[in-house]
Image (cartoon, rainbow, N blue to C red):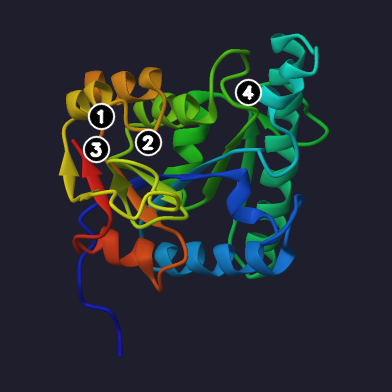
Amino acid sequence: MPNTIKPIYKRILIKLSGESLCPAQGNGIDFDVIEKVAKMIKDVKSLKVEIAIVIGGGNIFRGAPATKNGMDRTSADYMGMLATVINAMALQSALENIGTFTRVMTAIEMPRIAEPYIRRRAIRHLEKGRIVIFAGGTGNPYFTTDTTAALRAAETCADVILKATKVDGIYSDDPMTNPDAVKFDELSYIDVIKKKLKVMDSTAITLCMDNKIPINVFNMNEKDVIKRIIQGEKVGTTVK
């Protein structure tokens, strides 16, 4: 039976962590997981929603542990950016294997691998119905992929940032370690900053606040979760 529920968003930006693509135990890429993610994204695409994705690289390399072992922060951050490109290429392959046109755009130019990020070209790809994966972070050290998501969402005029996590929203504390942590259904940007909630870094939250971009934090493992969100169902936690 055809779906009759009209999406409440025209253009979305999905923020995927690198960890969401790795095996339950260990690092790297779990291709069963990435295939599942690709099918979920294709399912959402069938609703005629324009989709951009920002992907992290923590399943391959994280800068913070490297700096603790003596590596300078700039080099560590650039290595993290390269890890996001690997993840983006893997996700692109999974999407194209199931018939979904996809473009990878990188903040650091590497023309043999992907297109360089050019705002107008990215918007044109979205308008033509292609999924666009933004890799390489912002292209600068000291900025997270959360900040990249906020920046690219603002640049491409996305209606919302959908941040995929392993928990079903934002809590007052880590629900994995604190059973008394309280889940929030809705928060303001200022609440997130004042309460020092570990949703996105403060730069990302401020960018979203300045540009009035709502953030929806949800559990990626829930069935049809992205489709339910863009059809208006209250899922996870909304920051606005």
Q: Which mark is residue 107?
A: 4
Residue found farthest to the right: 112
In the rendered image, residue 201, in percent from the top left (x then y), is placed at 41, 24
Q: Earlier in the sequence, mark 1 or mark 4?
A: 4
Which residue was labeled with disc 1?
192
Q: Earlier in the sequence, mark 1 or mark 3?
A: 1
Q: CA distance from mark 1 to mark 4?
A: 28 Å
Q: Determine crowd level at label 3: few under 14, some 14-19, many 20+ residues with C-alpha closer than 10 A.
A: many
Residue in the image at 77% along x and 50% along y: 28
In the rendered image, residue 119, in percent from the top left (x then y), is placed at 49, 25
Which residue was labeled with disc 3?
214
- Horizontal placement of 169 versus 14: left or right? left
Front tag of 4 and 2: 2
Q: From where the camera sits, is residue 119 visible? A: yes
Front tag of 1 and 4: 1
- The three-letter code of the residue at mark 2 reads Val
Assess whether mark 2 and mark 3 are in contact (beta carbons under 8 angstroms).
no
Specify the quadrant that holds the C terminus. Answer: top left
The answer to which image quadrant residue 86 occupies is top right
- The three-letter code of the residue at mark 1 reads Val
Q: Determine crowd level at label 1: few under 14, some 14-19, many 20+ residues with C-alpha closer than 10 A.
A: some
Q: Earlier in the sequence, mark 3 or mark 2?
A: 2
Q: CA distance from mark 4 to mark 2?
A: 23 Å
* 59, 121: nearer the viewer: 59
The answer to which image quadrant residue 29 occupies is bottom right
- Horizontal placement of 54 versus 76: left or right? left
Residue found farthest to the bottom: 1
Which residue was labeled with disc 2?
199
